Image (cartoon, grey):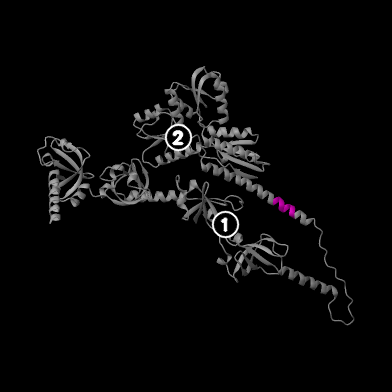
Amino acid sequence: MHTIMASHAGFCAGVKRAFKIAEEMAGQPSKWYTWGPLVHNQSVVEYFARQGISAVEDIDEISEPAGLIIRSHGVAPEIIQEAENCGLQVRDATCPLVKRVHEIVQVLADQGYEIVIYGNPEHPEVKGIQGWCGGQAAVVSGLDDIKTLNHSHRMGIVSQTTRDEKEYFEVVKSLLGRTEELKVFNTICSATQLRQNSALELCQQVDLMIVVGGEFSSNTTTLYKECLNTGVRTYLVQNAGDINPHWLEGVKMAGITAGASTPDWIIKEVLCRMTEYEEKDIQQEDIQQEVQDQIEEQTQEPVQEPVFEPQQEEPGSNEQPAEEANEESFARMEAEMAEYETPGRGDVIKGTIVQVLDDEVMVDVGGKSEGVVPLRELSLATVDSARDLVQVGEEIEVMILKWDDDGTILLSKKRVDSKKVLDELEEVFEKGDTVQGTVKDIVKGGLIVDVGVVGFLPASHVEDGYVKNLEEYKDQTFAFKIIEFNRNKRRGSQVVLSRRELVLAEKQQQKQEFWDNIQEGQIRLGKVKRIVDYGAFIDLGGYEGLLHVSELDHKRIEHPADVLQEGDELEIFVLGVDTEKERVSLSRKKLLKSPWEVALETFQEGDIVDGTVVRIAPFGAFVELDPGVDGLVHISQLADYRVEKPEDVVSVNQPVKVKILSVDANEKRIGLSIKEAQREMEQEEVEEYMEQQE
């Protein structure tokens, strides 16, 4: 049996977005909930439950201050309003395509159209769409429901995003006879259509289809129905444990696809399980072939033994009798044959290298035969030339792959090395020890790791949570646990690795050390881990603390990303420590000079500087010299004539030249004069003119 994966399967963009938002919220110190299941997949729901994010169906289920994530299917606006009225933080993870449907029905309702929604009336997406048009829409799930609709002059129709496109347009066609004007919007998600098309193409190549996804997922059940309608035997499974081995009996080609709400790790588990069954088939075929080979050998004609004619012994001769001579000859032949016994396929023997070329190595393995090791069978590592690895005269162990007709033996050093490495890895696996490995490549669903042989590291086992960018791990060396080991596996990875437990243990140790040593008032070196609208989470080595946007600088910062980037290292001041709630508040501002400290170093009495009028009072105007540093131009210093009202001379946001009359460090006051600045500048102009005249 051979297994093929559909070209489009698994998480769509909308689900990935919702998953990412929930991951971000899981890392925050506050408690978060989702309104209903985030997506219709139990594995995803259970994953976030372990992260501390649980699903609720009623705002009253939330008793403490918390946050609410709106699921990918969307909700009615009343639910969002109720959550905000209860003081909950709200993060909207509604799929952007569903959002578009909300906007369409809002516009249709405002324009007085009768709205029809094609979909499942009990599906949360449909209920949410109804909420955005005041609950006035009619929901139809098939052609029979069209008959119940009243005639209307103006109608508009939208579809649940995960429905079948052909069925939708059949409904649209049927609706034409019930209205004079019909506005049609194709709101079916293209990702749903892509998954259906690629699954249907695959159905033409296979004997059996496995559809992976939640039983309550609309897009998954639609995908299952489409495959079933092709006539190919099709099964719907939620995970690898649902696969029945009896389904696969007699199957030569199996296909796998997955709904848009199915996570990668579930798809990977199903693929691994199918690969295991595939390997069993291959092993069975090998056993049958070996049995057949043995039968053929036994049925071949036996080789006739040589016949020795007895010779007449001459009288008086001292030679041995013929019978004794023959026995001695046979003994000598047997000894010689034992010495030069021909090794068989799969045997491991030692040999000496007699020639090294770029693409192969010649090995003397004794007897009258020569062995050749092709470059591809020389090393587990990829090399350009055999000369880089071995040299003439070196003794190596090799495995016999096959005999050529001319007596040349095809050998492999790589397979001997692989067996040794696998022996070591098997011992590591049985003892539960760790192994060092280097990440070599990024593939769908995880990373390829060199641990002596090729190992697979699933994306869900790279860290203890979701990893956004796997590229960061390439060429890095880590310690790994072996979670699966199968040396007989011919397809897929014989070794499956994990860092998750090791990372969790290391983080737990770092966390304990962190809380044993953290104190208010400390200055620590941190690294920007994540940037959010209200601040940044700083990794302090074992724990993350919050640097609020108000503590970034003395001046106002619109968004943390204006001054910080993920990965930045910076010194940080510990503002507060709450060990019970495990919260640490941080400040960058505390380590920066205040605007007034900078002003005292920058501005001196008598300087003429640029400024901007920021506020006008009855007694004068306030001029900003630097962000956070204002000085007062008294009304008497606005002009060299009597000023009744400051606004007669200056206006807000007007740039001006001012002279610094006084600086009071204790009171943080600066006295300014526009009049003196103008007078001094005019005097300088006169002096400059006179100098030019001379």
Check the picture and name the quadrant holding the N terminus.
top right
Q: Secondary structure at mark 1?
A: helix
What secondary structure do most residues of the magenta stretch adopt?
Answer: helix
Q: Amino acid at mark 1?
A: Leu
Q: 475 above or below 240?
A: below
Taking depth in this image into account, of 198 and 545 the one nearest to the observer is 198
The mark total stands at 2
Numbered circle sitting on residue 422: 1
Quarter of the view holding residue 194 = top right
The C terminus - image quarter:
bottom left
Where is residue 287 shown, x and y percent of the image?
Answer: 69, 51
Q: Answer whether residue 434 is visible to the viewer in this image.
A: no
Q: Is residue 620 above or below residue 102?
A: below
* Horizontal side of residue 437 vs 338, given as left or right: left
Where residue 65 sits in the image (x, y, percent)? 34, 34
**Residue 152, labelled with which disc?**
none
Can you name the residue that lies furthest to the left here?
642
Q: In the visual, does 296 lie left or right of 542?
A: right
Assess whether residue 104 is covered by the magenta stretch: no
Q: CA distance from mark 1 to mark 2?
A: 48 Å
Mark 2 — residue? 96
Q: Which residues are magenta?
A: 287-293
Q: Position of residue 368 (x, y in %)?
A: 71, 69
Mark nearer the N terminus (1 vs 2): 2
Q: Are marks 1 and 2 in contact (CB under 8 Å)?
A: no
Q: Is residue 205 left or right of residue 528?
A: right
